[in-house]
Amino acid sequence: MDFRLDDDQRALRAGVRELLTRRFGRERLRAAVDPPRAAGAADGPGRPGGGAPAPVLDRVLWRELGEAGFFALRLPRARGGVGLGLAEAVLAFEEAGRALLPGPLVATHLAAGEVPGAATGECVVAAVDGTLVEWLEEADVVRGDVTGAVALRPVDPLTPLHRVDRAAPPDPVAALLTAAEQLGSAARTCALAVQHARTREQFGQPIGAFQAVKHLCSEMLVRVEVARSAVYAAAVTGDPPDIAAARLLADEAAERGARDCLQVHGGMGFTWESDVHLHLKRAWCRARRGPCAAQSEEALAEDLLAPEECPEECPGECPRECPGA
Amino acid sequence: MDLSCTPGDEEFRARLREWLAAVLPGLPPKPSPDDWPGRRAYDLGWQRLLYDAGYAGLHWPVDAGGRGATPTRHLIFLEETEKAGAPYVGANFVGLLHAGPTIAAEGGAAQRARWLPPVLRGEEVWCQGFSEPDAGSDLAALRTRAHRDGDDYVVSGSKIWTSHAEVADWCELLVRTDPKAPKHRGITWLAMPMDAPGITVRPLRTLAGSAEFAEVFLDEVRVPVGNRVGEENDGWRVTMVTLSFERGTAFVGEVVACRRVLRELAYEARANGRWDDVPLRRRLGRLNAEFRALWRLTQWNVSEAERTGGVPGAGGSVFKLRYSQARQELYDAAAEVLGPDGLDLDRRWTADRLSSLSYTIAAGTSQIQRNIVAERILGLPKGR
């Protein structure tokens, strides 16, 4: 057993981080949030005071992600993919969450090999997840029933949303990749809070020297590390209860982490200019994807009634999702 | 990210399971919690069985008489013994997890030869004399003083929270040898024989009603200078070796046990109808997520320790913070499942609920752990 990342996994993570820093750094993020306005442009949703048009997906970046193998990561080599596993996909999505990379990343990744052009990033694929569809109007292909979809004025400036009536059945891989994005965001807000706490001075010392602030930061790290263990383990085992646990803990780490980060930033954290609200709003959007917390908790409760180790002959009554059940 | 065991590890696990299945049915009945001599004999007897089977001091270095096993093997050992319902480390805790590793790391050849084999063979019990009434979280403020008189230190003061003091042969003792030095630099580590004249042990009754701890009063107790481990006034550094061991692996078996309790709670709730209570059922589901993650965090920390040569790092503080809270939530949920019976001390889980209250305090309070995480991992500045 060696739970740590191996050398290839470290290299992959560093590669994705380098790509995203170069192609979607803070300036690009802020430009996406507040695109330069053309004269006389109509007001759109999601902006303070009714601001700018709905966000546009950067298709050049999307194809670059495709070329880098972001969408084809788990597709077998024989089918033109990278041939890696869930663990590597989780690392890539963690980086995407850290960078607040916009777009229907999970839906397109899951469509690789099934929808032509998805693997290479030439085709943008959206999908019904929970009772929402992200990036419906920008997508080339939409999976799931979107009849009667209603546009929302989305809380996250980089996640256009439509509501649908019928929820799509949750997909475990989608749930895990969402958890990975939440993990990346949680780790990032922890780092942002610590950075601010070390440099911001009040009462003649860095605010991070005060225990009230210190303890907020410590709890953020604890939630990140607990979520990380759960997410990575779920990527290794692929077991539905492990994925449900990972999702619950990563949602919690991302949402509470962004809130605490906002608190540590004080008044500046409440401004549009700060990035903290972008993490919080995106975390809220991801948390709405399937399965919801109640479904995960119910599944994990049922799992407690399953025998710890399967008997030699399956009695067929246990709630565990396995081939023998 | 590899969670699979090597064939060697699986073989180790299989042999251990076989041995446990053979040896556990032959154990004597468990002594009652108040029977201290009985508990000592029971715990030492178990340690002797481990020794004879080659499982004693699994994680200790070979030159200290241990087996030099990897942290992964140690994890398998703790997991399997707990799953099989084997006895806890009990009275051997301080010897195996605190004093022993400290002597192995810092003691001289004669000291190692004198003290380590009896711990491994289950012949001697150690207790810990660190905390004092006025030195809890601020351990370095301890005031029990010792001065040299010929070949002895003469020790006076008092210690508190000492488990197994009534039945211990030795006490790993921290004393102040230089009252003028800065507080961390005037401390010395001594091995004190518990039969020395001048020692009074007074049991301390906890809120759970039992006497798990004791106060130890020291009145001019003579401890030979040869019982000092490390240099005079270097005891703080010597001690830090022990404390990191405490946070590293001490709770592995307990996480396995908590997961079992959680499953038992689910069955109890289904039997008594509480399973239909949706918020309670969801609470149990969330606790399942919590303890699954804590088990994975344990595996993560063990993998890290494997790289650092077995010494657990500050990751132990991250684990302890979350685990201590989760354990309290587990037994609060148990009380909810039991309903009115949750107030009955004769129901299992009620006493465990009471003892869980110590977890956010013992071995470094949660507030101290948060300082450690903030300063040593996150690099936040120390307060003035």
Image (cartoon, rainbow, N blue to C red):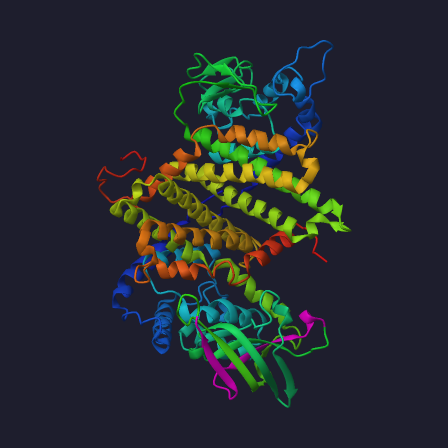
In this picture, is B276 found above or below B194? above
What residue is drawn where x is 52% and y is 42%? A228
User: Percent x, y for residue B116?
Assistant: 48, 74
Q: Nearer the viewer, residue B78 or A82?
A: B78
| Left/right of residue A164 with respect to residue B315 in the rendered view | left
For residue A185, which quarter of the picture? top right
Residue B196: say if magenta.
yes
What residue is drawn where x is 58% and y is 30%? A281
In the displayed orientation, state which residue is furthest to the top: A40
Q: Is residue A177 among what the camera can see?
A: yes
Quadrant occupied by the C terminus of chain B? bottom right
Residue bounds of the magenta highlight:
B182-205
In the displayed orientation, state which residue is furthest to the right: A204
User: Percent x, y for residue A191?
Assistant: 64, 41
In the displayed orientation, state which residue is furthest to the front: B340
Q: Is residue A8 among what the camera can see?
A: no
Picture mark count: 0
Q: Nearer the viewer, residue B65 or B221?
A: B221
In this picture, is B213 found above or below A57? below
In this picture, is A254 found above or below B140? above
For residue B281, which quarter of the picture? top left
Residue A138: say if magenta.
no
User: Percent x, y for residue B134?
Assistant: 60, 72
Q: Nearer the viewer, residue A210 or B88?
A: A210
User: Percent x, y for residue B269?
Assistant: 30, 47
